[in-house]
Image: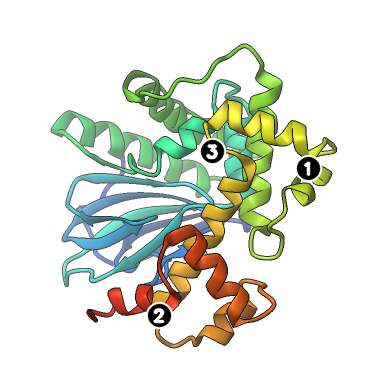
Amino acid sequence: MLDINNTETLEIYVLGDDFKFYQNLKYLPLTSYPSNIQSALIVYSLRGKAKLTVHEDVHWIQPKELIILLPGQFVSFSDPSEDFLTVTMVISSSLFSDALSGAPRFSPHFFFYMRNHYWYSQTESDVLRIYNFLGMIKGKVTSQDIYRRELIVHLLRYLYLELFNAYQKEATLKTDRKDIRKEELANKFFELIMKHFKENKDVAFYADKLCITSKYLTMVIKETSGKSAKDWIVEYVILEIKTLLKNTNMNIQEIAIRTNFANQSSLGRFFRKHTGMSLSQYRMSHLGGN
C-alpha cells in the first residue's frame, strides 16, 4: 500500500521516457490554458483543490478524487490551493497504446465518453483500493524487475478496463460489435487526428495514411461515432483555435500561422462558419467583454 503520511517532499520515479510517478505533486504537468495533451495522466488528489478544464467542461478537483485524462484531450490546470497535493502518473502515448492493446473491447465511443467522465469521487473503501493500486505501481517502477514495464502495462490495463466497464453500464451510445475492423480503423483515425489536425484538415490525408478511400473512411467514422470524419477534424481545429484565442499573448496572424491557415481572413471565415461567431467576438466573450 502507498504510504503518504510520512512526508510532503516531492518524490519522482521514472521508467525511461515512458512513465513518470510523482508523489506529493502540487502543480500538475499541464498548461494554464487548454492544450492538446499527448500523454495520459492518472491523478489522485490527496488534499486541497484546483481547477481543471477538459475540453470545455470545468471541474474543481477535490480531495479523494481520481482524475483520468487520455491523450488527445484538450486540458488546462490552474488555481491550486496552498495545500493542494496529488499522486500523479504521466504515461507516454506509446505505453498508453500498449495498455489498451490487450483490451480489444475498447471502442471510439469510450474516448468520447471520457470527455465528461474524467473525475471520480472515492469512498473510504475505494481509497484503500486506490492506495493499493498506486503502491503496486510505485513498487514496480522503483524495482529492478526485468519485466517491470510489462507489469506496469498490465496494472494500467486493469484500471482502464474498470473504466470501460463503467462506460458500458452508463453510456447511452453503444457500439455495434459486428465489425471489429471498423472500430480499429476509427481508433487509428482519431490517433492520426491528434497528431496532424493542425497541418492537415482534409479527409483524403487521413484516408491515405490508413490506405483506404476517403469515401470508405467517411462511412466508417459515421457508423462508429455518429459524426463524419470531416466533422471530427473540424472539431479538433476549432478547439485549438478557441484555445489560442483565450491566450491573449497571441494575435490573429500568429494564430493563423499556428493552425496552418493561409491568412487571417481564411481563418476568420472557417471559424465563423463552424461557430457562428467572429474571432474577436469569441475572444472578447472570454475576456469579460460584451
Badge 3 amino acid: Ile
Residue 82 in percent (x, y) is at 17, 72
- Cα separation, mark 1 vs mark 2, equals 34 Å
Q: Upstream in the sequence, badge 3 or badge 1?
A: 3
**Closest to the observer: 227 or 244?**
227
Question: Which image quadrant: the C terminus?
Answer: bottom left
Figure coloring: rainbow
Question: Which image quadrant: the N terminus?
Answer: top left
- Cα separation, mark 3 vs mark 2, equals 47 Å
- Compared across the picture, whether 215 is left or right of 182 comes to right
Closer to the eye: label 3 or 1: 1
Badge 1 amino acid: Ala
Badge 2 amino acid: Ser
Q: Identify the residue position indicated by label 3 in the image.
A: 152
**How crowded is the residue under tag 1: few (<14 C-alpha within 10 Å), some, or many (20+)?**
some
Query: Residue at 82% across / 36% down in the picture?
Result: 213
- Compared across the picture, whether 218 is left or right of 54 comes to right
- Number of marks drawn: 3
Q: Please, what secondary structure does the residue beneath circle 2 have?
A: helix
Q: Identify the residue position indicated by label 1 in the image.
A: 207
Rendered image: mark on residue 225: none
Rendered image: mark on residue 280: 2
**Closest to the observer: 177 or 237?**
237
Residue 189 in percent (x, y) is at 67, 41
Query: Residue at 22% across / 36% down in the picture?
Result: 127
Query: Residue at 51% across / 61% down in the picture?
Result: 273
- State whether residue 174 appears in this view: yes
Query: Residue at 31% across / 79% down in the picture?
Result: 284
Q: Are marks 3 and 1 in contact (CB under 8 Å)?
A: no
Q: Please, what secondary structure does the residue beneath circle 1 have?
A: helix
